Amino acid sequence: MKTASGTTLITNGQLIDGTGKAPIANATLILRDGRIVYAGPAVGAPKLPLGTTKLDARGGTIMPGLVEAHFHATYFNITALEDLDIKYPVEYVSLLSSVNTRLALECGYTAARSGGCLFNVDVWLKKAIEEDLIAGPRLAASGREICSAGGLMDWNPEFRKIGMEGLVFVINGVEEARKAVRALVKDGIEWVKTYPTGDAASPDVNDHHTLCMTFEEMHAVVATAHNHKLKVTGHCRATQGIKNALLAGYDSIEHGTFMDDEALDLLLARDVPCVPALFFEKMSIERGREFGLSQRVIDGHQETLDGGSASALRILRAGGRLGMGGDYGFGWNPHGDYARELTFFVKHVGLTPLEVITCATKTGAEIMGRGDEFGTLETGKLADVLLIEGDVTADITILEDRRKFLAVMQGGIIKAGQLAQPFPTVVKWH
């Protein structure tokens, strides 16, 4: 991905650096060749050369680009099983995913960690973004997910004779677990997504207290993935599933819904981040009926929301790390609503705006394994920056409205927002 050339001065705004420190009023941010060279009070800022580009934050907020830590670029208005694998071919899924990446960038998300994708599309999506062929967040690619036979993602009954090969590897035992990871290694993914537990969406067979992989299978996934320098995460709702994942060596936990004291101690001991993805549950409850969800399923999502909210707050208050984002791309939880999750954590879970912003910037970059490159506005880091009308610490809902974005910058280049130029439509091949 290209970075800007020259020097840019950003003034007239409060600066939130993403580290959790208090905002700096009347701040200055200086960028040179796509990287940050100064972030602090206007008083004391270094002198700048002639020809410096100047941007006015208009009294608003200067902050790091947001990180969507559980991104499903290949999900598009999912309402039924066939939408996830059977409805569209890989060619159309690829096109839809490029629409979602552009939308995410326009919403202020300059980076994203995949939470699983169809057909391993993310690998090539990442390449297209990094080569500036399409607009989108810096991407950590996942691929087809792994679930044991009969588990949450093995939905089709045997008589249909239709698998879910574009979405998951359905495994039986440790040898098939290793084989699935090795297939992902060959395709170039970075994160292996698994399904250790069930979900409220499947109350009869694989509810949110059900285990969908054995510990031995999970350990085989981790050992094989770590051998090839891949990271492992998993859809973990059931308490024992969370513990199994942490004991097996998982690198992050998705959801972490029903966490007891033992699970929390394991999480903190290994400093494993958790991505709760709670707004999906809220939307499943609020809009489920219009999409045909049964009352049993909706009630299960309510239990999940209550348990997940309590667990998330306990994790953060105990000194653990939370990433923000998750499971957008469903009909009732569409792409583009990413920042509504941030509002939910402030208004319903009990985090402060500054805590949520830190989770959605610094911790998100750390989950991606790139915390030394971006996620905070600190000297030497890539200039992935948002300029936003208004004070987001006073009103976190501002982040939900992309019309409030003056600029969304990647490497110092304005890619979206009011100050952006149209994304180029002509590509020069070298």
Image (cartoon, helix red, strand yellow):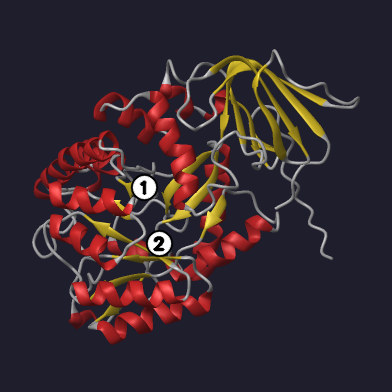
Q: How far from the left and from the top, in percent, is residue 366?
A: 47, 48
Between 317 and 94, which is closer to the camera in this rendering?
317
CA gap between label 1 and label 2 equals 11 Å
> Which residue does the image show at 40% across and 57% down from the upper left?
115
Residue receiving disc 2: 116
Between 44 and 309, which is closer to the camera in this rendering?
44
Residue 332 shows in this picture: yes
Give neighbour class at mark 1: few <14, some 14-19, many 20+ (Cα, 10 Å): many
Q: How far from the left and from the top, in percent, is residue 104?
A: 52, 43
Q: How far from the left and from the top, in percent, is residue 160?
A: 23, 80
Going by the numbered disc 1, the residue's amino acid type is Gly
Going by the numbered disc 2, the residue's amino acid type is Gly
Indicate the quadrant where residue 395 lies.
top left
Say left or right for 194 vs 308: right
Q: Is residue 381 above or below residue 189?
A: above
Label total for image: 2
Residue receiving disc 1: 326
Say left or right for 302 vs 355: left
> Which residue does the image show at 31% across and 31% down from the upper left?
345
Indicate the quadrant where residue 205 lies.
bottom left
